[in-house]
Image (cartoon, helix red, strand yellow):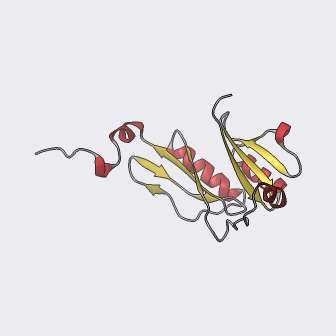
Amino acid sequence: MSKMIFINLPVADVAKSTAFYQALGFEKNAQFSNEQASSMMWSDAIVVMLLAKPFFATFTPKQIADAKTTTNGLFALSFDSKADVDKIAEAATAAGGTEPHGPEDMGFMYSRAFEDLDGHGWGPFWMDPAAADAGPPEHQPIAEA
C-alpha cells in the first residue's frame, strides 16, 4: 500500500459538509461513506474523512474542539498556480465557508485561507519552484557588490 494521509474532521452535518467539499473539487468515495461519515478524496494519497461528531467521539476520549472558536490544526494544500489558489478559496466562500484574511503574496509564494462550515482551517498555496529551491528570502545568499 502506498503512503497516504487521512485527515479526520468532526462535522455537525455530514451531508452539508460533503456538499461543501464536493464544491471544492473533492470526490466522495461512496465505498467508505455512509450517514456517519464521508470519505472525500483530494488525490490518490490524500483523503479527508468527514465524521459526524458523535461518531468522531468514538475514536478519542478527549473533548472535541469547537473549530469555530479554537484552532487545533491548519491544513495546507499545494496548487500549480495562483489562479488555482484563488479558484478554491472562492469556491469555499461560495459554498458557505469563510475567509479569515485576504490573499498573501510574498513573491515566491502565494496563499489564501478559508474555513469550512465547521471552522476547520485550510491554506491553499502556490510556490515558485525555482524560488523554493533557493529557500526563504532571508536564507538566500546576498550578492556581493
Say if 62 sits above or below 28 in the image: below
**Left of 69 or right of it: where is 34?**
right
**Left of 54 or right of it: where is 137?**
left
Which residue is outermost to the top?
1
Occupied quadrant, residue 29: top right
**Left of 128 or right of it: where is 121?**
right
- Quadrant containing the C terminus in the rendered view: top left
Number of numbered discs present? Answer: 0
- Quadrant containing the N terminus in the rendered view: top right
Residue 3 screen position, x and y as percent: 63, 33
Closest to the observer: 54 or 38? 54
Which residue is outermost to the front?
61
Closest to the observer: 33 or 112? 33
Residue 28 screen position, x and y as percent: 78, 41
Residue 143 screen position, x and y as percent: 17, 44
Which residue is outermost to the left?
145
Who's the residue at 36% across and 41% down the image?
Answer: 131
Who's the residue at 79% across and 59% down the image?
Answer: 57
Residue 11 screen position, x and y as percent: 77, 59
Who's the residue at 72% across and 56% down the image?
Answer: 95
Say if 34 sits above or below 99 in the image: above
